[in-house]
Image: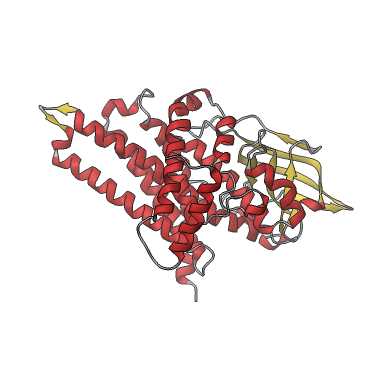
Amino acid sequence: MHLDAAETKRRAARAVAGHRRGMDFELGEEQRAMQDVARGFARDEMMPHAREWDENEVFPVATLRQAAKLGFAGICVREDVGGSGLSRLDATIIFEELAQGCTSTAAYISIHNMAAWMIDAYGDDALRRRLLPRLCSMAHLASYCLTEPDAGSDAASLGTRAVRDGEHYVVNGVKAFISGGGVADVYVCMMRTGEPGPKGISCLVVEKGTPGLSFGAREKKLGWKSQPTAQVMFDDCRVPIANLVGREGEGFKIAMAGLDGGRLNIAACSIGGAQFCLERTLAHMRERRQFGSRLADFQALAFRVADYATELEAARLMVRSAAAAAGAPGATRLAAQAKRFATDAGFDIVNGCLQLHGGYGYLRDFPIERVLRDVRVHQILEGTNEVMRLIISRELLAN
């Protein structure tokens, strides 16, 4: 079944409306159609190339732009600027499927979506209309810049400073571990414009080619090799005040709102990667024989995959429940719970699938080790899983 981008958006919008009428654990016809589109794209356009992208550290821009034609570059961005106008729930369905094609590439699409959504949700109309049409087509690529060399989990302590000078901000500082660094066209950056702590942080868009903007060398990473990662550096970088997203002092709130969605998407990517590995492990167990029997006939091994399937379904339901609650009271805690559970479960399942493949699982000729390397970082980025526990416990123990 082939749907064009416009029809995909219409069907997904009707599906969201149906979902909001009440709790329903089954996807409706329209959601399944949207899922099929994402699954087909992952199977046909991503999966056949994932090994090459990983081995040669290829950033597949042409494939990203093909994904954008299906509406996957501005999933939650409003339609008046080229977005799909879909919900957080829709995004998790899409990213679970894309991650089965290439977990690393799907994760970059998630980051691009997060940055685009922040501009759409908090930017003024002029900024939205100037930047988002090209972001929604992926003619331009986006990066999210919060982390610094000395400000990781303690993001509110960031030191990159933006000082007002007439109609510009003069920016100095360094951002670290930036996906798309050096390649992206739009950098959505958290800068200190005021007092210490979260209330002194503002959000600025810095565009590629701005004088004073430069980049570090491409980082050598364990996984996520189909997307570049580099430091983003500012040396008296002059950014127009028109590039301010929201108001001064709102940057930390905007950054955290973006992460609520990003955590759900990266959790969905972990589920997709684990589902990919589990399906291949089940096929391997049906075929592989040892001691005269199929691996599938050993009860201890069969029980292991039963547990993996159970944990995977629990993670999927938790992520979709949190996504359906986006914008409601407690949504940040629910997103943190879903991210913590799904990314931990995803890595454990992939690691167990590698074990069940024996020595073959350790070979680069088989895809399990690549997915293992890609999903490991999901327990670190978008807030470490230790920080997720902090968010959860603070709400639980609050007066």
Q: Using the image as rendered, state which of residue 38 and residue 328 is in the foreground.
A: 38
- Residue under the image location 56 percent in, 54 percent down: 259
Residue with the most extreme left position? 292
Identify the residue shown where x is 41% and y is 35%. Answer: 371
Picture residue at 67% right of the left edge, 50% below the top: 81
Residue 367: quadrant of the picture? top left
Considering only vertical position in the picture, is 394 above or below 347? below
| Near-viewer residue (183 or 37) | 37
Residue 326 position (above or below residue 128): below
Q: Residue 151 at what x, y percent from top left?
A: 62, 49
Q: Position of residue 232 (x, y in %)?
A: 68, 39
Residue under the image location 63 percent in, 41 percent down:
137
Q: Is residue 353 left or right of residue 388?
A: left
Q: Tell me if I can see residue 146 in this picture.
A: no
In the rendered structure, the answer to whether residue 286 lies left or right of residue 265 reads left
Residue 56 lies, with reference to residue 327, above or below; the image says: above
| Image location of residue 237, percent across then percent down | 80, 42
Residue at the bottom extreme, as displayed? 399
Q: Quadrant of the N terminus?
A: top left
**Residue 253: image location, x then y, percent:** 64, 61
